[in-house]
Each structure stands twice: as C-alpha cells, then as structure tokens.
Image (cartoon, rainbow, N blue to C red):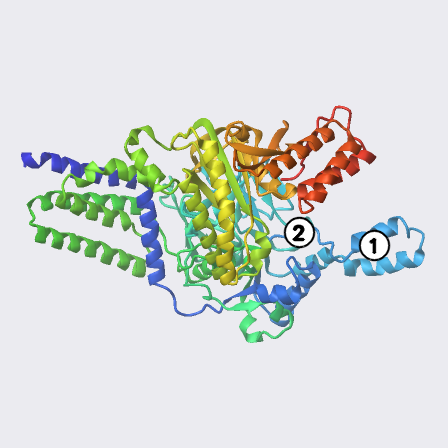
Amino acid sequence: MRRHLIRILLSLSLLIVFVLHSTSVIHIELLQRLENYTYDIRVRLTPLEDVDKRIVILDIDEHSLLHEGQWPWSRNKLAHMIDLLFDHYEIDVLGFDMVFAETDNSSGLPQLEQLAQKQLLHNSDYQQQLQLLRSELDYDQRFAESLANRRIVLGYYFDHDQRREKGGIGLLPTPILTSGSFNPEHINAAKAQAYTANLTGLQSAALTAGFFNASPLVDRDGVFRRISLLQNYDGNLYESLSLAVARLALRETSVKLKYEGESHALSLESILLGRHRIPADFNLGTLIPYRGKQGSFPYVSATELLKQTVPKELMQDAIVLLGTTAPGLMDLRTTPVQDLYPGVETHANLISGILDNRIKERPAYTIGLELVLLITLGLIMTFLLLKCSPIAAIFLYIGGMLICIGSNLYAWHYLNLVLPLASLLLMITLQFIFNMSYGYLIESRGKRLLAGLFGQYVPPELVAEMADKPDEYSLTGESREMTVLFSDVRGFTNMSEGLDPKQLTQLMNAFLTPMTSIIHQHRGTIDKYMGDAIMSFWGAPLPDANQAENALDAAIAMIDHLDDLNDEFAQKGWPAIDIGVGLNTGVMTVGNMGSKFRKAYTVMGDSVNLGSRLEGLTKEYGVKIIVSEFTKQHLDSAFHFRELDRVKVKGKDQSVAIFEPLGRLGQVAESELEQLLRYHEALQLYRDRQWDQATLAFEALNQSQPESLLFQLYLQRLEQFIEHPPESDWDGTFTFLTK
C-alpha cells in the first residue's frame, strides 16, 4: 500500500476537487458546462410527442408583417384582435409577450389636436367634428377599453443593471407578494433596478401584467434552461408572464411560497398556485419543461386571425400567447431543444408544465446526494483500481457508468428529479484514465487549465505561448494600456428581415468565422459577439508591444477579406456585407467580469466606450476604419493617416481627433498623398474660420472625388457656418449627441 501512496493521494486529490466543486467551494466551468450538456441531452431524449392544444401561440410572423405592415401595429388593430379573440373565438386567457410603453399616435390625433388649438381654434365645425372623432381616433383608449374586464396579462421587462438610476417607464402591476409577506432571507430573487412597463391607462385597464425577461437566470453558455418566476423590485415580488397567465387560467388570485422545514425554513422548495406546485430554487427560478422543438403548440398567424379564417374550435377556451417568430423582431433564443427558438414558446412550455404539474426539480438535497455518490464512487475507484487488471478495470469503469446513467434516468423519468450526472461520470472517467496512465494527466494539467480559461478567447498559438509560463496568467482584473476594436455590419436589421432563421444563422457563422480567424492571426483576443458586431482587444492576456499595429492590420485585413466573402455570399443568394471598424488605445480594465450567474473575460472603461463610438462614426464620415489620436500616436512611423475631424462623442466631455488610415508608409500612391495635403490645407482653412476659402478648397476636392461623403459633409457644415457662424471660442470640434 505504501508504494501506491502517491497514486492514492493523487486520486483522492482528484476526488476532493469534485467534492469542492459539488459544495460550491470552487467552481469548475467545464463541469458546469458538461452538467448543462447532459441536462440538454436528457431533455432532447424525452420529448412529448403530442401538441398541447390548450395553449395557442398567436404569431406575428413574416406572413403577418407582409400583409398587415411592419411592427408595431396600431393599437386600434390590436384592440380589434382582442375583441375577436374573446367575443368571436371565446378564448380563456390572453398573454402579451411584448410591452406597450409608448403612446400610439398613428391615428394622427395629436396633429388634429394641435390644429384645434392653433390654426382652427375658432372653427366650430372642425371643433365639433374633432369632438365626435376623438374617441374613435384615440387608439390607446380604444385598446384600453378592449383590455378591460377580460383575463388578459400584459408584458413588461425589468432591467437589472445596477448602474441604472432606479425607476422606470410606465406603470407596474400590483406586486403578487408585497414586502413583509415573505422572508427575504430565505430567497434570492433577481433584483431589478429599473423597468419598462405599459402605459398607465393600459395597465390600469388590464387585470395584471408579467415580466417576460428571464436574463438573470440564463446559464453562462447563453442557453435558456431556467426562467424567473418572481423578481424583486423595491422590496416587492412581481410575477412572470408565464406565472401570471397560468394563475389566471387556474382562477387563482395569489401565490404562496413553500419552504423546506417548518419554523426555521432551510430553503425555498416551491411556489404554490392553489393545488398546483411549481418547483422553485433559491433564486425563485424554475426549469422550463420543454415539450420538444418549435411547434409543440398550435401556431396561428395573426393576419389569418384578423381575417377570421382560423377554425373557432382551435381557439375556443384556449390560453393564447401573442408573440413573434419573425427574425427581424429578434425574439429568438437558444434552448436545449433548438438553437433558435421563439421566446414566446418558452412561456407556453412553462404554462403547460404548470397546468400538468410536470416541471422537473432540483431540490436542495441533491447537493448532499451528489456529495455522497461522489465520495462513495471515488473511494471505490481509488482503491479497487489499484488491484484490478486492465480488463477488470474496464469492466469496473463500464459498470459504474451504467449504474450512474440508469439510476439518473429513472429519477428523471419517474420522479421528475434532475440529479447531477456529469460530475459523477467525469469523476469516474478521470479516475479510470488516471489510474490507467499514471502521471500523464498531472504533467499536462497546467496546460489544460490554461486552455480552459483562455481557449475561448485567444488563438491556440497564444495559449501555447502562455502554457510555457502558466502561473503568470490569470483572469484576475487589472488595468493596462490596450487597444480595442469594434466592428459592426451596416444595415443588419434590414438584411436579417430578408432571411429565414436558418439562413441568417448560416450567414452570420460564415461571416464571423473568417473575421475571428483574421483577429486571431493578428494576435487579437475575442471579447464577445454582439449579434452582428465583434468586439476584440490586444494587449491581454499576453502583453503586446505592437498592439496598435496588430489591431490596425487586423482591421485592414477584415475589410480586404469582405470582397472574397461577398463573392461567396452572392453565389448563395445572400446579401452583401459591409462593415465599419473603430479602434482606440488607452488604459482599460481587463479580467473576468460579470455576475455570479455569468462572467466573461472582457475589458471595460472609457477607452473601450470611445472605441465603440468610433465604429459608429464610420457611417457619418463614409469611411471603413476610424482610429483615435491615441492609436495613431503608436503608428505614425508606420502608416499614413487622414485626419477626419475633432469630435466630442456622446458620454465624453473631452474632444478627440479621429483619423482614417490610408496605408503603410511607402505603399500610398503619390497622387493620393498630394490630395491628402490639399485636404489638410482645406481642413485648416475650415478650422481658421475662413469659410469662403475653405468652401472653394472642399469644392475642388469634391469635384476630384465626388463619391466622397467626407467632402460633402464639410461642404454642408460650411454652408451652415456661413449663415450661422459658431461661437467665438469654437475650436473646430463637432459634437455628436447620439451614439
């Protein structure tokens, strides 16, 4: 036994790691991802084959937008839809997966009122007709009247950004649980800082409303597995859209929190709706009981309902959720059953699960059960594998895996319990591999850990460099000078409306993959993808003495690659892509940031915000790339630049000079350099307030290059300044009031 002491200690150390993760002393991202992955597999393997006809999704789809016009539709049309649903189709409950926070002025009533108060103030006929038409043209009032005395749940959303000022837009519904009616020490509901709710008149007319954003409980991989049932705002608890709809459907007026234990509650166990029990965790969230892929509920196109071509028996006594699957309206989510899944159907799944008491749960005792199983199986593997032959070890390994999987699936299917699986399977597997190849995993542990931390952000070759000295790199936050790059696809919203979800996904993958590869080739770190936008940075985790040059080279390569990429897109019938890129260099904070629910290795600070603003300015000046004066300072010996302007961007008090890179020194044509000199002379005349001479200079430049938006922009400014000169202390800075 003594000769196996090191082996036993290392095996036990491996077991201790899993035990510490199970007890939340440490967090292993890989284990959490694998646990999520095994959960997703179980969801996909156990779909309900039938369609739940109790819940109908009234879909604002592409077909509806084509026939009824772009969203948002007038409240008058929505009121007519509500009347049809309740009076003709006799539905039971209606839920809105949307918010009505702004007044509907599409009828033209405000303009008519303005005429009545000014030009036609003394026109009695006009005043009389307007009085008769006022109620008919007040679409919000018409909509509010359609909401009254009907089982309707409006939607709204909470903002959890603690940097926001407390308060919100519109009127919140009455909280389902007020402060003092529950013990805040036994729950950890997501705390909202602000909200965007419905107009006061609409909310006052409706029975209630429910929030529809589940973002606080979205898993770190961005997959919607859980959803908030209750969230905290100003000490009160507000119900979700799903919970509110289910409550009205069950004719319940309140909810109740049920805890484990009696006089001293250990933890939240469930939320009760009368006889219906909804398993809930400490965060007042619950697992979404997905029935299957999209289409597990009947879909009715909104335009077909307005035409009254929908069979009445399909809608009668049904719970109806009004939402959208149109890609342009961006209510698509990543779920265990489908990568692009309508958000409204997630609510339908939860309502269905509540009605059937079919929601799976992770009770608090599963942590203790996982701990017992880990220790038991870990000790068995540690000591039995010492004496097993390779063949016996294989049988022991396979037997342990089958027992874990079989018992887990039994609890899943028959007891509605979600028991931990990935940690057990991985622990058994690692114990087996370790004992079969003693020392191999230990020697490469440092490289694997580093790859696990940074592999999703930086290219493999940088990880390889970092692996030589893994102790020098971590996710701990620090401040350092770095260069940030923002790129964004122009006209993406219009482009996405012309593609179905599958095509849009394929297009974005085909675009983001080569762009990411270019950034990696130039030693950049991917921060995040924001829809069609890319954010990356240079200078972390590896220091980079040539960070500004590498970043600009990457930006130029991205622009150059678009020609080849658009040729490929044209062959597939996809729209061409054009991007703008902004670069800024400065001191930034870099590290693993976020909440306890989700974190990312990212950069923050004023310098980052400036980079984002510069990307937005590319459209204003008609250029592909804009760099700040701070980035240019690092590149004067390598590149030619054209100064575009001196600007104050939104959120900044100090002005900054912005530049367009023209090319490397020695690679720019002489004619282009001559025109650059004439442009800078014209720019100086403009800043010296010599309006007439500057106008002549820019007109000459515009004639030589009429397609240049930059020259036209300055001619427009000069025209304005000639008529309305700026203040005497004007230094040539232009202030942008929007992002």
For the question of whether residue 397 can be seen, the reply is: yes
Along the line of sight, the residue nearer the viewer: 313 or 460: 460
- Seen from this angle, which residue lies furthest top? 729
Q: Amino acid at mark 2?
A: Ser
Along the line of sight, the residue nearer the viewer: 344 or 95: 344
Tell me the residue that label 1 is attached to.
Answer: 112
- Could you say which quadrant of the image residue 159 lies in? top right
Residue found 29% across the figure and 30% down from its top = 469
Percent coordinates x, y for residue 672 in the rendering: 61, 38
Residue found 11% across the figure and 43% down from its top = 383
* Residue 204, numbered label: 2
Percent coordinates x, y for residue 24 in the rendering: 32, 38
Percent coordinates x, y for residue 505 in the rendering: 47, 57
Instruction: Give the left or right position of residue 3, taking residue 457 as reference.
Output: left
Percent coordinates x, y for residue 595 in the rendering: 44, 38
Indicate the quadrant containing the N terminus: top left, top right, bottom left or bottom right: top left
Instruction: Give the left or right position of residue 208, taking residue 250 as reference.
Output: right
